[in-house]
Amino acid sequence: AIANGIESVILTPNPVVSTWSEQEEKFIPESKLSVLDGPYLEREKSLEHLSKPQVVTNIEFTREMTIKRAELLSRIAKMLIVDEADYL
C-alpha cells in the first residue's frame, strides 16, 4: 500500500508486524504483503520463496545480520520502510 507495489522490506517493532498485515488486508483486497515471523531460520527459508513483492518483519530480525540474510533481503527490496524508527 504505502510502497505502491514496489518491492519493499518493512521493518517494525514486533507488536506492530501484525498491525501492518491487518491493515493491509482491511484496506487492500489484493494484498501484496508477506509476513515473516517465526524462528529466524524459517524466515530465511521463506525469503527464498516469497510470492509477494513486499515483506514485513520485526526489526530484531536484522540484528545479528548474517550475510545470507542480508543478501536475501537486499535481493527483494528496492525500498526500505522503517516503522517506529525511534525504536532503533
Image: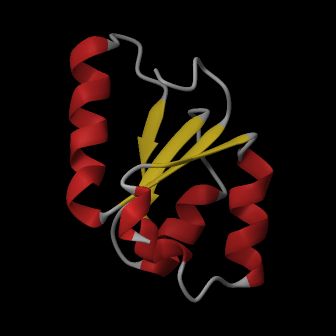
Identified at 79% across, 67% down, the residue is: 71
Quadrant of res 23: top left
Q: Could you say where residue 43 lies in the image, as x and y percent from the top left?
A: 49, 67
Quick check: 53 above or below 47? Answer: above
Quick check: 38 above or below 20? Answer: below
The quarter of the picture where the C terminus appears is bottom left
Q: Could you say where residue 56 lies in the image, as x and y percent from the top left?
A: 44, 49
Quadrant of res 24: top left
Q: Could you say where residue 67 lies in the image, as x and y percent from the top left?
A: 77, 81
Quick check: 19 above or below 30? Answer: below
Identified at 55% across, 74% down, the residue is: 62
- Horizontal side, residue 42 vs residue 18: left or right: right
The front one of 20 and 49 is 20
- Horizontal side, residue 75 vs residue 8: left or right: right
Q: How is the image coloured?
A: secondary structure
- Horizontal side, residue 16 vs residue 52: left or right: left
Identified at 33% across, 70% down, the residue is: 38
Q: Could you say where residue 17 lies in the image, as x and y percent from the top left?
A: 30, 52
